[in-house]
């Protein structure tokens, strides 16, 4: 995900309200009763706080100054009742806000994941998964915090402050006016500090997400870390990230906490002036002290909500940064969606045809150029070529992980760009060169191929993939957890489970992207024998480094630099000793590695060989 530099972000003054309105528009209807409870409880807390300040005047005057014994009972009952109401109301407010906040976090986590599943493969190629997961986990709290801060600040702090100011004005309007003079300098301080905090909040969020993502990636790749003795280097890098995160967090603390001494000094100045003037009136003018005590109590009690309101804007800046980053992700439109009026795919035989297909990931670098070939229905078509020839891209385009730049891809005569992606991919079983298993059991991972598959079908698929034997040797058999990314299984075992997952899908088209590359010779032979039965009646496209695995293919496509250079059967291609395919075989025979990557393009023109086509190019 591409994110703006924190130094380039301009936060409009109305942006907090705009984001807040969007959150409320999306969620307020579902939480209206929780909001009502939280608001009522907040008003009760505010009311009892103002009442506590007001009752100080009759308490001092009637009990301590006028010595009225009858006033003790009702004043004590008033205090007791106020604190009881305040305690229960505070509890109700906290529970209501926590319920809203926790549900909001869960709701947005589900919503974000659903949206991520709609984004194309290109997004995930450009975004580090560890950093994305960490960033989402950190950012999603911004939605909750914006709402909580707003409700608490408006319904509790603001109302409490208004109530206490009302008590102050009722008791002494002159003193109230003088004490409110601290407002303008406090507002100026809030604006200044908010502007400073705004510049570093987003950078802090990004660095923290990088730190968490780096830790996640290091732990996932711990075997490589230890094999290449990378511990010290990774510790240094993560240490640098931790230091950067610490530095920015400290800077935020230094800037935002400047409000505390400013507000404390202003409040101290106001309280000192009020006490001095009140003392003068009591001692010199002989006025009763009750009103003064009530006024000072209200003034002191007003300090906390006033300070919280002053700090609210600073706190909301960080919540706003997080919320905005969530909406940046949610507002990101998939580059590749279903075409307007796309229909459900109904493939019967599964014949695949590439018609003059061209594609590039970046503008300057073509990957496939004017590629045309047919994978016959129910037959095995093999794609061979050196690394970078475009073999895996071909498979990605067939599944519409990307859309072609030119040309068309058809299955049974249907343009795949005009059918829904879900129906297209439901008709394809895919085994990648890098087997990936999800959290859960071996049985769960095979069942992902088709969720409706029975246990018997899962076990039959495992038998066909030569996986049943090692699965039954596991501690819990098919119900054995595979660990993170299948860490409890070997590479070959993971590959056989992924092949079983493709088998159980029972799709008319089978894609094998170097599916046996992680297997030893014995396991490869067993899987190849099993795949021979599985491929029967299915259109199968195989990408292979080991040419021994495609000897029996019905059709072989040879690619170089994104172009088809030869096609035919194994026998017809080997009949020409100067063919690219024959040269691959010689390289593999000499090195015994089974790696087509070692073959380099031949720079001499190739004549046409009987039984195969050599397109007009230099190879």
Image (cartoon, rainbow, N blue to C red):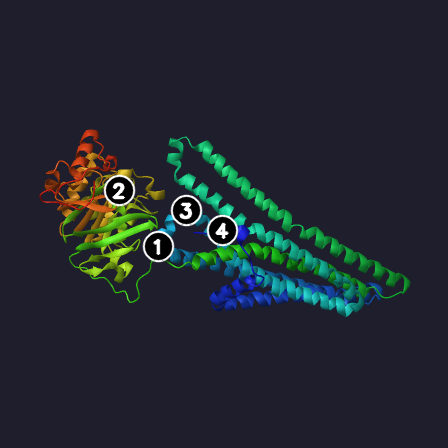
Q: Helix, strand, or loop for circle 3?
A: loop
Nearest the viewer among 430 and 149 is 430
Residue 495: give its label.
2
| Mark 1 vs 2, N-terminal side | 1
The quadrant of the rendering that contains the C terminus is top left
Q: Helix, strand, or loop for circle 1?
A: loop
Residue 435: give its label.
none
The CA distance from mark 4 to mark 2 is 34 Å
Q: Is residue 419 visible?
A: no
The CA distance from mark 2 to mark 3 is 24 Å
The number of numbered discs placed on residues in the rendered structure image is 4
From the viewer's perspective, is 115 left or right of 149? left
From the viewer's perspective, is 412 left or right of 194? left
Q: Helix, strand, or loop for circle 4?
A: helix
| Mark 3 vs 4, N-terminal side | 3
| Pointer 2 local density, CA inside 10 Å: few below 14, some 14–19, many at least 20 | many
In the image, which is nearer the foreground, mark 2 or mark 3? 3
The CA distance from mark 3 to mark 4 is 15 Å
| Pointer 4 local density, CA inside 10 Å: few below 14, some 14–19, many at least 20 | some
Q: Is residue 572 above or below residue 378?
A: above
| Mark 4 vs 2, N-terminal side | 4
Q: Position of residue 294 (x, y in %)?
A: 77, 64
Q: Helix, strand, or loop for circle 2?
A: helix
Q: Position of residue 238 (x, y in %)?
A: 49, 38
The CA distance from mark 1 to mark 2 is 25 Å
Which quadrant of the figure has residue 229? top left
Q: Which residue is mark 4?
A: 138
In the image, which is nearer the foreground, mark 3 or mark 4? 3
Q: Position of residue 300 (x, y in %)?
A: 73, 59
Residue at 76%, 70% in the rendered image: 170
Residue 120: give its label.
1
Q: Which residue is mark 3?
A: 128
């Amino acid at each position: 995900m591409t994110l703006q530099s924190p130094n380039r972000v301009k936060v409009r003054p109305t942006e907090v309200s705009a984001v807040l309105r969007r959150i409320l528009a999306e969620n307020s209807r579902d939480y209206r009763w929780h909001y009502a409870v939280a608001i009522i409880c907040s008003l009760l807390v505010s009311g009892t706080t103002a009442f506590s300040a007001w009752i100080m005047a009759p308490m001092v005057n009637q009990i301590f100054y006028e010595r009225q014994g009858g006033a003790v009972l009702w004043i004590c009952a008033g205090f007791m009742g106020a604190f009881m109401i305040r305690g229960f109301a505070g509890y109700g407010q906290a529970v209501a806000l926590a319920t809203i906040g926790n549900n909001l976090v869960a709701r947005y986590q589900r919503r974000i994941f659903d949206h991520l599943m709609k984004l194309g493969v290109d997004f995930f190629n450009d975004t580090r998964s560890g950093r994305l997961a960490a960033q989402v986990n950190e950012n999603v709290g911004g939605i909750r915090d914006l709402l909580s801060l707003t409700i608490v600040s408006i319904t509790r702090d603001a109302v409490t402050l208004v109530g206490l100011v009302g008590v102050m004005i009722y008791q002494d309007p002159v003193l109230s006016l003088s004490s409110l003079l601290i407002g303008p300098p406090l507002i100026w301080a809030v604006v200044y500090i908010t502007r400073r905090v705004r510049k570093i909040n987003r950078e802090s969020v990004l660095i923290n997400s990088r730190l968490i993502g780096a830790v996640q990636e290091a732990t996932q790749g711990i075997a490589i870390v230890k094999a290449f003795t990378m511990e010290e280097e990774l510790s240094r890098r993560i240490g640098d990230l931790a230091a950067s995160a610490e530095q920015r967090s400290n800077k935020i603390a230094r800037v935002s906490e400047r409000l505390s001494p400013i507000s404390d000094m202003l409040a101290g100045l106001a309280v000192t002036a009020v006490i001095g003037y009140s003392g003068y009136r009591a001692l010199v003018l002989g006025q009763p002290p009750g009103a003064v005590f009530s006024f000072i109590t209200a003034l002191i009690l007003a300090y906390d909500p006033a300070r919280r309101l002053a700090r609210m804007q600073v706190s909301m800046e960080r919540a706003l940064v997080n919320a905005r980053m969530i909406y940046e992700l949610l507002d990101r439109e998939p580059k590749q969606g279903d075409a307007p009026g796309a229909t459900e795919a109904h493939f019967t035989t599964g014949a695949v045809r590439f018609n003059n297909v061209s594609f590039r990931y970046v503008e300057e670098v073509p990957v496939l150029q004017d590629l045309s070939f047919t994978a016959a229905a129910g037959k095995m078509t093999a794609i061979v070529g050196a690394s970078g020839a475009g073999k895996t891209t071909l498979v990605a385009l067939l599944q519409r992980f990307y859309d072609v730049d030119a040309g068309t891809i058809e299955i049974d005569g249907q343009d795949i760009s005009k059918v829904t992606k879900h129906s297209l991919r439901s008709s394809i079983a895919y085994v990648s060169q890098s087997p990936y298993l999800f959290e859960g059991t071996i049985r769960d991972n095979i069942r992902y191929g088709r969720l409706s598959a029975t246990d018997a079908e899962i076990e039959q698929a495992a038998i066909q993939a030569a996986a049943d034997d090692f699965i039954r040797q596991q501690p819990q058999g098919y119900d054995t957890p595979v660990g993170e990314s299948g860490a409890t299984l070997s590479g070959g075992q993971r590959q056989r489970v992924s092949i079983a997952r493709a088998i159980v899908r029972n799709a008319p088209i089978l894609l094998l992207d170097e599916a046996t590359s992680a297997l030893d010779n014995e396991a490869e032979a067993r899987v190849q024998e099993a795949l021979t039965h599985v491929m029967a009646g299915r259109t199968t496209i195989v990408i292979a480094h080991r040419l021994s695995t495609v000897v029996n293919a019905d059709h072989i496509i040879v690619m170089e630099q994104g172009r088809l250079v030869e096609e035919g059967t194994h026998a017809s291609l080997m009949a020409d000793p100067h063919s690219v395919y024959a040269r691959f075989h010689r390289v593999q025979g000499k090195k015994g590695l089974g790696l087509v990557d070692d073959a380099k393009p031949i720079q001499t023109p190739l004549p046409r060989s009987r039984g195969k086509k050599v397109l007009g190019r230099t190879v």
